[in-house]
Amino acid sequence: MKLTYLGTAAAEGWPAAFCNCDGCRAARRLGGRNIRTRSQALVDDALLLDFPCDTWLHALRQGLDFSAVRWLLVTHSHTDHFYPAELVNRGGCYSHGMKSPTLDIFCNEAVRDYFYKAAGHELVPDVEQRLRFHIVRPFECVSAGPYRVTPLPAKHMDTEQALFYLIEREGRSLLYAHDTGRFYPEVYEFLAGRAAPLSAVSLDSTSGRFENGENDGHMGLPDAAAVRLRLLEAGAAGPNTRFIANHFSHNGGWLHDEFARNAAPYQIEPAYDGMTVEL
Ligand SMILES: [Zn+2]
Ligand SMILES: [Zn+2]
Ligand SMILES: [Zn+2]
């Protein structure tokens, strides 16, 4: 599997449009890996993880043809992860010569309902017919073509059950976990019960240098390091598991290189926009 990080920021992006904090001003000045768009990732150019408002920019910047994407996994309905208005452009007079006209979307009910609410009167029949929503539930495995996908319950919000995903293919595995606090005990139990250690784990690091503790809906590096240890102790991860931090907020205090320096002792590396990982 090839994983490409298209965007690696939390809700407001980094720098945020209306912000002049030290972190945003430094990102504007330094550029490079400090510029982070809203979180989205792509597996093998065919399976997309989340659909933020920066999706259009990601296709442009990475030279991607999103019409070839067959499967979309959505974590939850916060707009940095699901921007349904863009899906309205997926067909009709807006999109010609699409490589995969049908898009299978795996999500919770809130995401599907948000799509219909946002699309409203702009939804034309051939767009709607090409979107197939599949409502998924924690721990209930589904198939997305060659991928085995297991939704897991995120500790993130009260108004819906946010999800994160385990994606497996031909013995390789990716745990893509952002917009979650430290995991629920049943998630560790489930992951410990798998036959082989995870190939890669992508962990929420919204809070950067700060610790959120057991009961918050996000993580900082101290939390990600604690989750890594628990996964290792449980046997869900091993010495060859690659740990990557993702979903950064400007409130987290560390720019890319500072995060990398501070995370290195924990064998965690920060993602950046455009980063690719071969699993
Ligand atoms: Zn988010
Ligand atoms: Zn800021
Ligand atoms: Zn969220």
Image (cartoon, helix red, strand yellow):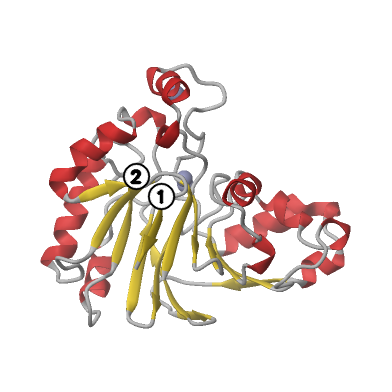
> Residue 167, relative to residue 258: is it above or below?
below
Quadrant position of the N terminus in the picture: bottom left
Q: Quadrant of the C terminus?
A: bottom left
Check contact, mark 2 vs mark 1: CB within 8 A. yes
Who is closer to the viewer here, 50 or 141? 50
Q: Among all residues in the image, which is located at the extreme front?
A: 63
From the viewer's perspective, tell me whether residue 141 is left or right of residue 37: left
Q: Quadrant of residue 24?
A: top left
How far is mark 2 from mark 1, CA to CA? 6 Å
Residue 207, image x and y in percent? Answer: 32, 36
**Circle nearer the N terminus (2, 1):** 1
Q: Could you tell me residue 232's position as x and y percent?
A: 14, 64
Secondary structure at numbered mark 1 = loop
Front-lying residue, 181 or 231? 231
Q: Determine the image quadrant of residue 177.
A: bottom left
- Against 91, residue 208 (above or below) is above
Characterize the local packing of mark 2: few (<14), some (14-19) or many (20 or more) Cα atoms within 10 angstroms. Answer: many
Residue at mark 1: 179
Count of numbered badges drawn on the protein? 2
Residue at screen point 36% across, 54% down: 155
Residue 188 visible in this rendered orientation of the protein: yes
Residue at the disc numbered 2: 218
In this view, the residue farthest toward the right is 93
- At horizontal 20% and vertical 36% (from top left) the residue drawn is 261
CB at mark 1 closer than 8 A to ligand 3? yes
Q: Nearer the viewer, residue 130 or 109?
A: 130
